[in-house]
Amino acid sequence: MTEKANFKVDPRLAKLLGESYRSTEYALKELVDNAWDAEATFISITLPEPMTLDPIVIKDNGNGMTEQELRREYLTVANDRRSRKGDRTPRLKRLVKGRKGIGKFAGLMVAGVMEVKTTARKRQTQVVISKDILLNEEKDLEKINLPISVSEIEDGVSGTTVMLTSLNQRYEFPRADKLKSILMLEYGREHDVSIVVNGENLSVEDLPGEHFTHDETLPDAGTIRLNFKISNGTKPLKQAGIAIRVGGKIVGKPGFFGLEDDPEIPQKLLKKLYGEVEADGLEDSDSVTADWGQ
């Protein structure tokens, strides 16, 4: 059954929807941040082939929303989640990344139409938002009727899918390599989320810069691989250093393994070092704590 939903708006809406992003990829990152805040452990982004009319699809297995939550919270523009629920997510205690409550509508900076399908508590709620209607409607935005429908689904399923169509021609077509690089810097050290872009997991190789690998066999760890890059950017990297990855999960915080004490290595260079030691042989070792060193 299809009903109508309405926006609940903040006076800053016109300014916020006109907010610019450096690129299509940065706008899409906002939608990934939303999935993170919804405690998703798996996020998939599918980008269309250039010169096609295929949609951009961002899918997660997060908490999802009920119809009431979508109406009350999602469709309230500029509704800052932190002011309502705090700086941390309830179950995984993640630091919330959404800052102004507008990131959920970043899809409208990229596309003309944003379709949201969200599932929680045995129900899937779907709403379609057209940017043209929002911008061209003369009446107050909170009075605009948005098509919304609700259907029953299997129990135990939750998550949200955002599909973007009618891509904005003023933006460059989204590039998988650039998006993966942006997401790797933000999420590459996170141990409780897996992000896939066009079917490929994020990795150190996605970062810009010169790439190095080295394999070694150690008595207590078996074969390990050092995999790192030296960024060719001008700014220091977020969470620079070498992290240890065991069984696909990051253990503890990244460090420099004493390189920071070497007078021959410039500190500025260390801040552009980003890498991992893959040591799956430690998975059953007592040196790996139950909480993965977090």
Image: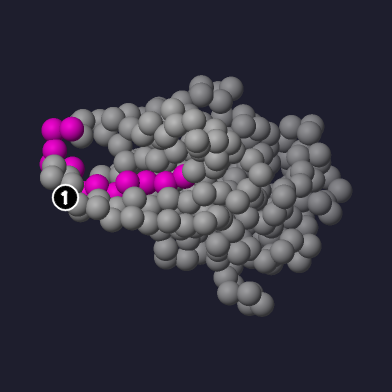
Q: Residue at x 72, y 48 (%)?
A: 21
**Residue 105 appears in view:** no
In front: 35, or 124? 35
Q: Residue at x 49, y 43 (%)?
A: 273
Q: Is residue 25 above or below residue 250?
A: below
Residue 230: x, y in percent?
52, 49
Residue 116: x, y in percent?
55, 53
Instruction: Answer whether residue 276 is magenta in the image.
Output: yes
Q: Amino acid at mark 1?
A: Gly
**Residue 284 appears in view:** yes
Instruction: Answer whether residue 238 is magenta in the image.
Output: no
Q: Quadrant of residue 98?
A: top right
Mark 1 highlights which residue? 222
Q: Quadrant of residue 111?
A: bottom right
- Give the magenta part as a residue range: 274-287
Residue 5: x, y in percent?
63, 46
Left or right: 156 in relation to 175: left
